[in-house]
Amino acid sequence: MSKDLSEVIGRVLPAPENHLSAEKMEQARKARRRFMGNALAMGAGVAASATAATRAMAAEGEEVILKLPEHSTGLGQSVVTDGYGKPSKWEANLQRRQSPGLTRVDQASVSFTPLQSLFGIITPSGLHFERHHQGWWDIDPSKHRLMVNGLVKRQRVFTMDDLMRLPSVSRIHFIECGANSATEWGNVAVPTVQYTHGMVSCSEFTGVLLSTLLEMCGYDKKMGKYVLAEGADGSSMTRTIDIERAMDDCIVAWAMNGEMLRPENGYPLRLVVPGIQGVSWVKYLRRIEVGDQKYATKDEAVHYIDHMPDGTHRQYTGIQECKSVITTPSAGQTLLDKGYYNVTGLAWSGRGSIKRVDVSVDGGRNWRTARIEGPVLPKAMTRFNIDWVWDGKPAILQARAIDSTGYVQPKINQLRAVRGTRSVYHQNAIQSWLVSENGEVSNVQVY
Amino acid sequence: MKTIFKLSTKAVVLSAALGAFSIGSAWAQTAPWHNMGRDATPAEVKAWDIDVRPDFKGLPAGAGSVSQGEATWEVKCASCHGSFGESNEVFTPIIGGTTKDDIKTGRVKGLEEGKSISPQKTTIMKVATVSTIWDYINRAMPWNAPKTLTTDEVYGVTAYLLSLAEIVPADFTLTDKNIAEVQQRMPNRNGMVFYEPLWKVNGKGDVKNVACMKNCAVDPTVHSFLPDFARDAHGNIAEQNRIIGPVRGADTTKPAPKGPVGSVALPAPVVVAAAPAAGGNDPKALLNANSCTACHGMKSKVVGPGFNEIAAKHKGRADIEAYLIEKIKNGGSGVYGAVPMPAQPQLKDAEAKSIAQWIAAGAK
């Protein structure tokens, strides 16, 4: 195929002589003369040359390099085209999604975070998973109030103005729904990590420590054993939190990832209960009551209870124990070819920080310790990476996290041996991904 | 002003003494933000402090009979939960799966391993505390108009549900005085276990694994996998992954490829544009936002008729738009069956009109 530099030069006005050999520079000079001649002869030669330029370039190199694209040769868009910037249109596949058939009413449903395509530890706020119990609201913050009552010296009311004047903290924590991975208690049920593990997100939350508010209200240190958190929405979600937890690291938060909470995540105020299942992170927080007994609310007496083999239910099992999952490559994805892959994933523990993550590519027979990417923070997502060369043969990828208490993430059969198969909540088993010879990755159970 | 000055002085002295001002310690009374906020009035506390605990602290005085509750139920609850709390259509069933023997023992036998649970666990099989039922109905029901029942209506509806589960007789009136006795008949009252290690952050878990590194004992069997027919049950996974990077989403609209697809001849990237944001009087957005779709399918009966069925039934009717607006806003029953459709007072006229026009145009 003839390399027709004339066409290249014809388009690219400042000739790239500095990058050419002496021979090619000569060609370029000739070509430029020819181009000028052509242009004169044809009158309106520029357009014709440009059209021709789109044809014959493959042998010389890649078209996307040789043929400068519009964004290199034209004028881009101005500032504030969009006052609140959005992701690239090329990223539109990354969406929160519902799992078909999982719920029947959209206002009492969940959407899952696309973990398969995310990086680092922070979940973009617009992709934060959703769980609503009776629909979400966008509440006027000037009309929102927080009340603290019960066993306190002073029953108090706070406006958002009041709260936001208080000393604040900003901390990175994961939030995981107690029912994350619930579909996998029995058998494999869903096709990708978005649906197996997507009810977990991690953000920087800003707010006032709940302990600050409780101290200000003079909570009863002798009788006050629990607090009840209550939301302002239709469901008025209520959850019991023990006073040690409340006085430790709970945050009455108004911000997430540097901006105010998104409405779907509780704007303008939500409780952050690090390490505890998401249902306790009450959204649209309107009230904190200090009490001396647990409350057995609907979501701690009918739901979010663990059905045990003997027919009993465990109540108040809120801790999200140590868990990890490989996010790339993960089920539903296809390895394009043999060779090197950076296997990457997330690990987290409601009891502390991540100490170590091991990865197996042979279904758990042999393990290697992964590289932990900083930061490693308590009750926050931790990103891990490990090198792997795929030889084109079937492989089963697993990750296993160990937290700062020494707890080792269990296998699904170990979980089932203690808790049976009919539980819905708190499934933190090692996840297996099968890489088939065709490069497709699928969700399997191997233990 | 004098007080503030005094507090500040104290704070300064303390700061000097401790080297740092300590937040949330015994010195909190002196914190400069100590008086942020204001005292709640008794009326405000009464308005919001609605929780009812298992020991019935917080339960307001009142009474409601089974028959009063049944009347409320038919109008405000049955459309979602079924006339007998048994419906598994919109929400999981409330009633069913308990026996007289369970009421005696306080343990629901049907929850034990090996027992079949059909169609699934009901609320009454699980809930141990009658306070939970009262509290939840009071705070969160009816579904589209929470906190609108009177105290006596909550007693009545609770009594009706308890009678359906044969916990109380059909002529029973539930009151704040006798609710503690009813608690002693809850079928699963002894079925809850408090397991502290999963409540306390510093507890030790109940499941143990060890971090074996080499030649670990594993069963090489793939115990469970997604069947082929479910390949596209969650849509095309290619459209749910990034279009660049080390991997692609599998094209689940096609059977699995025979070998690696390779990185050279990739198909053109698939990017699915985000759905336009719902807003204004878009009828389908209104149906979703107002829970209409909880009871009405687009093309089939759920609890109420499918929207296409309504469109077909009234096709050609001269006053179809006005008729539908009236039905949408005020509800009704008898046209498609006995289950009543509740009124939708929250709908604005323009919204009801938009939905009516959409149905009149064929509900497409």
Image: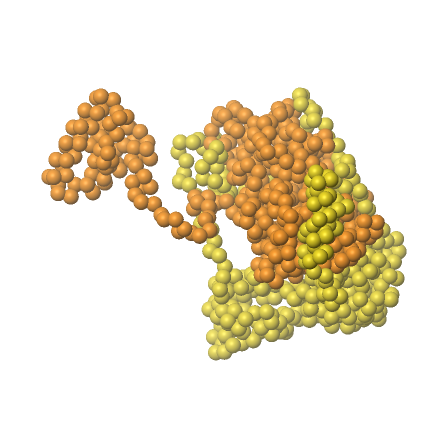
Chain colours: A orange, B yellow
Which is nearer the eye, A211 or B231?
Answer: A211
Locate the N terminus of chain B by quadrant.
Answer: bottom right
| Image height of B212 relative to A93, above or below | above
At a point 56% along the width and 75% down the height, the residue shown is B326
Residue B293 in percent (x, y) is at 58, 62
At a point 59% along the width and 43% down the height, the residue shown is A203
At a point 83% along the width and 62% down the height, the residue shown is B166
Residue B262 in percent (x, y) is at 44, 31
Residue B90 appears in the picture as rendered: no
| Image height of A142 relative to A75, above or below | below
- In the image, taking residue B239 as reference, residue A307 lies left or right, namely right
Residue A181 appears in the picture as rendered: yes
Residue B85 found in image quarter:
bottom right
| Image height of A253 relative to A416, above or below | below
Residue B42 in percent (x, y) is at 75, 66
At a point 69% along the width and 32% down the height, the residue shown is A403
- In the image, taking residue A76 as reference, residue A125 lies left or right, namely right
